[in-house]
Image (spheres, rainbow, N blue to C red):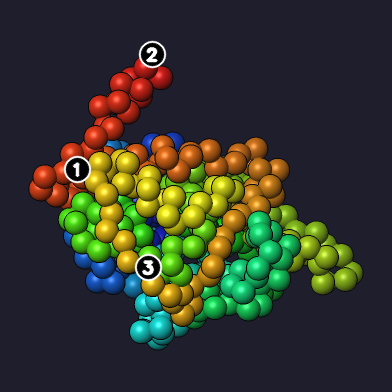
Amino acid sequence: MNILVTGAAGFIGAHCVLRLLCDGHRVCGLDNFNDYYDPRLKHDRIAWVKGQAGDFPLARLDLTDACAIDELFQAKRPDVVIHLAAQAGVRYSLENPRAYVDSNLSGFLNILESCRRHPVKHLIYASSSSVYGANSRTPYSEQDNVDHPLSLYAASKKANELMAHSYSHLFGIPCTGLRFFTVYGPWGRPDMSPIQFARAIAEGRVLRLFNHGEHQRDFTYIDDIVESIVRLIERPPQGTPAQNLEPSDPSTSHAPWRIYNIGGQHPVALRTYVALLEKHLGQAARIELLPLQPGDVLNTCADASDLARATGFRPRIELDEGLGRFVDWFLDYYALPGTQPPLAAERAVETQRRSL
């Protein structure tokens, strides 16, 4: 297939491009390489992908440039669009809300418009577990109400789901929204907790835990995210036509539109998470406990049973194994002085044993 991946230099995007290239697809990437965090990491991700799977076309475009986006669709004629580009981050949305309107609303509208003008077989786009907002019942189900977001970032992702539904209804665009739960792994974003926490521990700095470390998160390893996306590519939603346009299940529709959770389904307290990082880094953390921050969700846990029924796949990588892989990459990439991955040799032996 011809597949367009937006956010190709991002964390999930780079892993997704690599997998698709290795599977034999023709991939075109799109990214604006903005400076929300150090662009060098984005360039390094692309170099890593090319080193593993060879060169691929990569357009340096901004989502807000509607004409350039449409010209790219005209030139590449993608069969499938995997839309991962967005302004990320919950706390940053308190500081710079307009960035979320530009990228996550205007930018997504441009993607939808190009999918309308140049029909695609499937649009898969990133939503977020943040849409569950003030919901207190866990595990979060796609059938739950998501009308009470706690941050503008979450509100923008809920808006994406609604925008996709309207275009699916009006123009028949098959759209699948994916609510990701706390994605982690090698090449992750430096504003996310794995790198922030690992740097603080490795450098002996104070590690600040908000909500006094009582948060629970449903961590999802990057390979499980990518496997889920790949399995969904050739499963576009069909819709369930009916006289009554209001569905009984809010994750489906009469239109070819669908929502799935993708999460590890095993929430872990932040203190346990930090203890695992300490183990793999071979260093103790200096912890400062702080109150809950505005926009933070207390606990997350995914019900991913709909995903399993649709694809036959559930996220499999346990947090201990995933953090071990992350720490190996982290110590290698950042080359922090005086640090060694204490369990790297044992993992290498185990990996070799499994390959025999």
The label nearer to you, 3 versus 1, is: 3
**How many residues crowd around disc 2 within 10 Å: few (fewer than 14), some, or many (20 or more)?**
few
Cα separation, mark 3 vs mark 1, equals: 29 Å
Q: Which residue shows up at 56% across the image and 63% down it?
A: 299
Identify the mark nearer the N-term, 3 or 2: 3
Question: Which residue corresponds to mark 3?
Answer: 289
Name the residue furthest top. Answer: 356
Name the residue furthest left. Answer: 337
Q: Secondary structure at mark 2?
A: loop
Cα separation, mark 1 vs mark 2, equals: 26 Å
The image quadrant of residue 237 is: bottom right
* Quadrant occupied by the C terminus: top left
Question: Which residue corresponds to mark 2?
Answer: 356
Q: Residue 101 at x, y = what percent?
A: 45, 82
* Left or right position of 10 against 1: left
The image shows residue 121, relative to residue 98, as above or below, that is above
Mark 3 and mark 2 residues within 8 Å of each other at the beta carbon: no
Identify the mark nearer the N-term, 1 or 2: 1
